[in-house]
């Protein structure tokens, strides 16, 4: 399959518009709840993982998947606690993490980085796929630049902006009392990550940001990835090391004057073969690194 076709397939899966999502069969999707620590849970369905805080103040969630899943998300939340859903924090703007904003925004307060609101409120094109502006009800009404804290259910839930990683609006969410962190799509377990260069993302930025996050986390932290099972600090360190090593491989070949086609032909070490079996295969990942490094170098 050609690279453009693979990118298009990935974009359709990752950035489904509401109309496209309605064409999918969400009837078979089941919401799986996993207790993470204290009063924090992780919900898995279709789309990005949802972090949940349940307690005497009500319910707060991090990300909300696709709009057609809103009723299933509501049912799953009710199983965790009878409180009202009061806050939704978006880790970034992509539709598989913000789709249900259009439903939950009517009765809850949506919070996100400044750039998340800007992108949701505008037309965006990623890998040839265009998303239209979201309706007003789906937009964050509280935004932040560097950080924001919600004091809720007995702990400080802190959102910190890490610039130009997966996108230009990434927020990493810390449940400080429960020792849990939601990484959004700055950390995924499905293989090589999607770095949205068109939305201000950067491989170098993602690498730097994850390194900064790792330096602040205790060894026993529980990590909710943007996609994939509950993870550990060691898992995040392995992901970070992959970013460092694969970027260095491509960078050195670029410095040696190799073309993108030549670097793709050389490939990556065999130990990374398994990571290239998802949406982002090895040629796509090499091209992402190449374009990211070229952009930062002003080429």
Image (tube, helix red, strand yellow):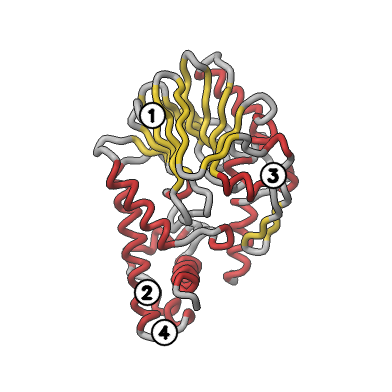
Mark 3 or 2, nearer chain start: 3
In the image, residue 87 above or below residue 140: above
The one of 15 and 57 positioned closer to us in this rendering: 57
Mark 1 or 3, nearer chain start: 3
Using the numbered discs, state the Cα–Cα distance from disc 4 to disc 1 in whole angstroms: 46 Å
Residue that mark 4 sits on: 258
The disc label shown at residue 251, or none: 2
Using the numbered discs, state the Cα–Cα distance from disc 2 to disc 4 in whole angstroms: 10 Å
Q: Do the residues labelled 2 and 4 touch (CB within 8 Å)?
A: no
Of marks 1 and 2, the one in the foreground: 2
Secondary element at image label 2? helix
Q: Quadrant of residue 141?
A: top right
Q: Which residue is drawn at 50% across and 32% down?
A: 43
Q: Residue at x 59, y 63 (%)?
A: 7
User: Would residue 77 appear left or right of 282 to someone viewing this image?
Assistant: right
Residue that mark 1 sits on: 36
Q: Which residue lies furthest to the bottom in this view?
A: 257
Q: Which residue is drawn at 42% across and 26% down?
A: 40
Give the x, y percent position of residue 51: 48, 32
Secondary element at image label 1? strand
Q: Do the residues labelled 4 and 1 touch (CB within 8 Å)?
A: no
Residue that mark 3 sits on: 21
Instruction: Say few, some or many: other residues with alpha carbon within 10 Å of mark 2 (under 14 / 14 to 19 / 20 or more).
Output: some
Mark 1 or 2, nearer chain start: 1
Using the numbered discs, state the Cα–Cα distance from disc 3 to disc 2 in whole angstroms: 38 Å
Using the numbered discs, state the Cα–Cα distance from disc 3 to disc 4 in whole angstroms: 41 Å
Secondary element at image label 4? loop
Give the x, y percent position of residue 142: 58, 35
- Could one spot residue 299 in this view of the protein? yes
Mark 2 or 4, nearer chain start: 2
User: Would residue 48 appear left or right of 21 to someone viewing this image?
Assistant: left
Mark 4 or 1, nearer chain start: 1
């Amino acid at each position: 399959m050609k690279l453009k076709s693979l990118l298009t397939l990935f974009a359709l899966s990752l950035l489904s518009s509401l109309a496209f999502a309605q064409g999918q069969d969400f009837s078979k999707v089941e919401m799986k709840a996993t207790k993470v620590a204290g009063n924090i849970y992780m919900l898995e369905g279709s789309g990005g993982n949802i972090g949940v805080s349940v307690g005497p103040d009500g319910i707060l969630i991090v990300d909300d998947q696709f709009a057609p899943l809103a009723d299933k998300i509501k049912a799953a939340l009710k199983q965790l606690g009878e409180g009202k859903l009061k806050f939704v924090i978006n880790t970034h703007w992509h539709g598989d993490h913000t789709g249900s904003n259009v439903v939950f925004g009517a009765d809850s307060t949506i919070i996100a980085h400044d750039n998340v609101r800007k992108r949701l409120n505008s037309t965006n094109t990623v890998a040839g796929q265009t998303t239209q502006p979201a309706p007003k009800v789906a937009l964050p009404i509280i935004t932040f630049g560097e950080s924001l804290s919600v004091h809720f259910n007995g702990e400080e839930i802190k959102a910190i902006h890490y610039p130009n990683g997966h996108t230009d609006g990434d927020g990493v969410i810390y449940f400080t009392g429960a020792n849990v962190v939601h990484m959004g799509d700055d950390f995924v377990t499905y293989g090589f990550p999607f770095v949205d260069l068109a939305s201000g993302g950067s491989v170098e930025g993602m690498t730097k940001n994850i390194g900064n996050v790792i330096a602040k986390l205790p060894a026993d932290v529980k990590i909710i990835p943007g996609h994939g099972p509950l993870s550990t600090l060691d898992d995040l360190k392995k992901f970070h090391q992959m970013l460092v090593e694969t970027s260095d491989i491509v960078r050195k070949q670029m410095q040696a004057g190799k073309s993108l086609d030549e670097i793709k032909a050389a490939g990556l070490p065999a130990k990374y073969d398994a990571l290239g079996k998802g949406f982002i295969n090895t040629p796509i990942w090499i091209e992402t690194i190449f374009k990211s490094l070229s952009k930062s170098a002003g080429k």
